[in-house]
């Protein structure tokens, strides 16, 4: 009995304990809300501030961007070829000539613009190295910009290659017709001219080798004439000799150097006859460079006080890459006075002094005399009274040859006389024409 009551009591206690646990486990915890601080408490803590008046804040106005002003050109143009394709790199000149002021250049699309409006009567010239220049007139209108199109014709041209001594010659100056147009050969010795009108043109080279004592005259291999046709390229190839030989020396007159003695040189090169000239300097020296190879005739002329000249010549064989020394010595001279008998009325005669051992020439034809020109030391005309005089001949043996009548005709006559000239001496001779 007692045990039953004990068990019942235990069950009651367990039920009560479970209820208590369920109650407190599901109950929300109590919230503690802090009361607001009083003004006095705020003053103690320093958190109480004086009331302030609200300030209005001014916001900046948004910036308005002004659109850029588009500049409208006065002239908008284009340069094209006959097929309508744009021409890049064409130059526009104000006026009727290519040397007028440059005002624009075409871009890759062939277009150009002019900022300033042209005068009503203005003209514009378009040029390009490969096309024929063209000038157009402006026609003012209401449209802005004024739009124009310039068409250029291709024309003809000249192209070639320059060889020197068999090698390609770069940096050689090439000109057409009295230096009106010029260019320079490239690294491969090539040159070209375009935009040329049909016609005949002379192409010449300038080797740039003309110092005061090295002044070569125009050589035949430096010039070519070509015919230019529309739409065609004429060829002008040049094959120059090496032109690197030199002739130099001194000129002495009666023991003293001669200043400004005239030197004339001729070279018979296979490509043509070449001539150059020079003058002696203060020391009597001369130098002629940039010469081709070949048989060479060198002549020096020294002016005398009486207005005549003393001359000497030399024959050389000039080779490629060679420098030759050729001096000229004029010793104290002798004088020859002469009289020619047997001349006809009004007949003109002259006397040649030929160097060499005396020999009797007898009567000679004009062609035979021409073959002796290299041996001529001097020549004078016979006066109307038959007299003649050689004021200065080098000492030595000479043959005096008198010619009379029209050269090359049946009336041509000749006679000769041998003489020996002594330095500083005067001699007289008499020659009879038969």
Image (spheres, rainbow, N blue to C red):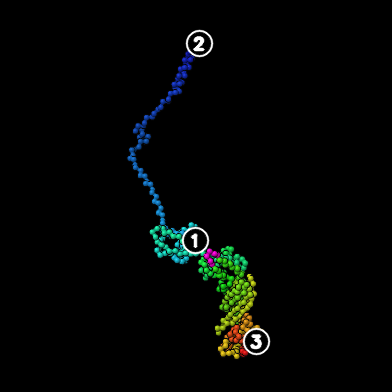
Q: Can you give x and y, in whole percent of width and height, for residue 372 in the image?
A: 63, 81
Tag 3: Cα neighbours inside 10 Å, few (<14), some, or many (≥20)? few
Name the dominant secondary structure of the magenta segment: loop
Instruction: Say if the magenta span includes residue 252.
Output: no
Q: Is mark 3 on a helix, strand or loop?
A: loop
Q: In this view, does 240 lie above or below 113?
A: below
Quadrant location, the C terminus:
bottom right
Picture residue at 55% right of the left edge, 73% below the top: 212
Q: Can you give x and y, in whole percent of width and height, for residue 25 in the image?
A: 45, 23
Q: Name the residue under label 2.
A: 3
In this rendered view, identify the residue nearer to me: 346 or 292: 346
**Closer mark to the observer between disc 3 and disc 2:** 3
Q: What element carries label 1?
A: loop
Q: Give the range drawn in magenta.
A: 228-233
Residue 322 in view here = no
Q: In which quarter of the image is residue 274?
A: bottom right
**Closer mark to the observer between disc 1 and disc 3:** 1
Q: How far apart are marks 1 and 3 (CA)?
A: 76 Å
Q: What element carries label 2?
A: helix
Q: Name the residue under label 1.
A: 82
Sequence order check, earlier mark of 3 and 2: 2
Sequence order check, earlier mark of 2 and 1: 2
Q: Is residue 195 above or below residue 37?
A: below
Q: Name the residue under label 3.
A: 362
Residue 237 in view here = yes
């Amino acid at each position: 009995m007692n045990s039953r009551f004990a068990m019942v009591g235990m069950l009651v206690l367990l039920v009560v304990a479970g209820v208590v646990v369920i109650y407190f486990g599901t109950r929300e915890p109590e919230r503690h809300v802090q009361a607001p601080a009083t003004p006095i408490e705020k003053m103690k803590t320093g958190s109480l501030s004086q009331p302030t008046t609200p300030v209005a804040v001014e916001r900046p106005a948004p910036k308005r961007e002004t659109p850029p002003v588009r500049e409208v050109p006065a002239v908008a143009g284009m340069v094209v070829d006959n097929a309508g394709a744009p021409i890049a790199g064409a130059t526009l000149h104000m006026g009727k000539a290519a040397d007028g002021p440059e005002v624009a250049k075409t871009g890759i699309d062939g277009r150009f613009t002019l900022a300033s409006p042209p005068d009503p009567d203005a003209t514009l010239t378009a040029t390009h190295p490969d096309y024929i220049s063209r000038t157009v007139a402006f026609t003012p209108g209401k449209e802005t910009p004024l739009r124009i199109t310039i068409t250029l014709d291709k024309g003809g041209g000249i192209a070639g290659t320059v060889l020197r001594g068999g090698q390609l010659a770069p940096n050689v100056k090439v000109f057409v017709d009295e230096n009106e147009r010029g260019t320079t050969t490239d690294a491969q010795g090539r040159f070209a001219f375009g935009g040329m009108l049909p016609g005949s043109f002379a192409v010449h080279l300038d080797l740039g080798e003309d110092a005061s004592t090295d002044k070569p005259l125009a050589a035949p291999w430096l010039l070519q004439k070509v015919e230019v046709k529309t739409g065609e390229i004429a060829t002008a190839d040049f094959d120059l000799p090496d032109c690197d030989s030199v002739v130099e020396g001194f000129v002495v007159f009666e023991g003293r150097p001669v200043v400004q003695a005239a030197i004339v040189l001729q070279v018979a090169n296979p490509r043509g006859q070449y001539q150059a000239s020079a003058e002696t300097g203060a020391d009597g020296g001369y130098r002629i460079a940039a010469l081709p190879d070949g048989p060479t005739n060198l002549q020096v002329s020294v002016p005398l006080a009486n207005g005549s000249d003393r001359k000497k010549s030399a024959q050389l064989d000039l080779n490629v890459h060679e420098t030759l020394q050729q001096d000229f010595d004029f010793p104290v001279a002798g004088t020859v006075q002469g009289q020619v008998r047997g001349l006809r009325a009004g007949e003109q005669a002259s006397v040649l002094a030929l160097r060499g051992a005396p020999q009797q020439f007898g009567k000679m034809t004009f062609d035979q005399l021409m073959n002796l020109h290299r041996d001529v030391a001097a020549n004078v005309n016979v006066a109307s009274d038959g007299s003649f005089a050689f004021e200065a001949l080098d000492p030595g043996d000479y043959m005096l040859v008198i010619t009379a009548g029209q050269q090359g005709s049946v009336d041509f006559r000749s006679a000769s006389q041998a003489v020996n000239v002594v330095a500083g001496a005067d001699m007289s001779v008499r020659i009879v024409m038969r």
